[in-house]
Image: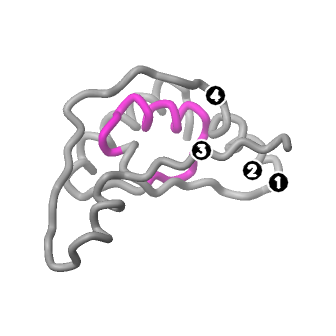
């Protein structure tokens, strides 16, 4: 089998199944050791554009990690979904990257 699937179960997703009436917030205190690197997203974006398909991402990573949002912009992402409290900061970061990359 040539396929590789990576599933990350976020703590709040796993814990949400235990007590429906309880809400718990989990915050990562640090990032762990990087186990893998890859270009899956970096390869997907240009391939989708070659097929005339726009690419967007919805998730927590661009909100929490500005360097990931910058990476997505450099790859040519068309849209990024953000948490409301991060829109201004991430939009400024995206604008800086777009200017440097001369993206429209």
Q: Is residue 37 left or right of residue 28?
A: right
Contact (CB < 8 A) between labels 2 and 3? no
Q: Nearer the viewer, mark 4 or mark 3?
A: 3
Q: Which residues are magenta?
A: 63-80
Q: Position of residue 41 (x, y in %)?
A: 63, 40
Q: Are marks 2 and 1 in contact (CB under 8 Å)?
A: yes
Residue at position x 52%, y 37% from top?
73
Residue labelled with disc 1: 51
Task: Report x, y in % for residue 7.
Answer: 54, 49
Neighbourhood count class around disc 2 (C-alpha, 10 Å): few under 14, some 14–19, many 20 upward: few
Q: Residues within 10 Å of mark 1 (few under 14, many from 20)?
A: few
Which label belongs to residue 33? none
Measured Cα–Cα span from mark 3 to mark 1: 25 Å
Q: Residue at x 55, y 31 (%)?
A: 74
Mark seen at residue 6: 3
Q: Nearer the viewer, mark 2 or mark 3?
A: 3
Res. 25 image quadrant: bottom left
CA separation, marks 2 and 1? 5 Å
Whether residue 5 sits left or right of residue 74 in the image: it is right
Helix, strand or loop status at disc 3: loop
- Residue furthest toward the bottom? 21
According to the picture, the residue beneath numbered tag 2 turns out to be 48
| Residue 36 part of the magenta segment | no
Residue 11 vs 96, above or below: the answer is below
* Nearest to viewer (mark 4 / mark 2): 4
Q: Earlier in the sequence, mark 2 or mark 3?
A: 3
* Disc number placed over residue 38 in the picture, else none: 4
Rendered residue at 27%/50% (across/down): 87
Percent x, y for residue 35?
A: 52, 23
What secondary structure prevails in the magenta region?
A: helix
Depth check, front residue: 97 or 32: 32
């Amino acid at each position: 089998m040539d396929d590789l699937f990576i599933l990350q179960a976020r703590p709040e997703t796993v814990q949400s199944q235990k007590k429906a009436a309880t809400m718990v917030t989990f915050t990562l205190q640090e990032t762990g050791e990087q186990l893998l690197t890859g270009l899956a997203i970096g390869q997907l974006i240009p391939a989708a554009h070659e097929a005339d398909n726009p690419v967007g991402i919805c998730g927590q990573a661009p909100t929490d990690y500005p360097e990931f949002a910058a990476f997505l912009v450099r790859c040519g992402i068309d849209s990024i979904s953000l948490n409301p409290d991060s829109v201004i900061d991430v939009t400024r970061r995206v604008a800086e990257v777009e200017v440097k990359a001369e993206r429209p």
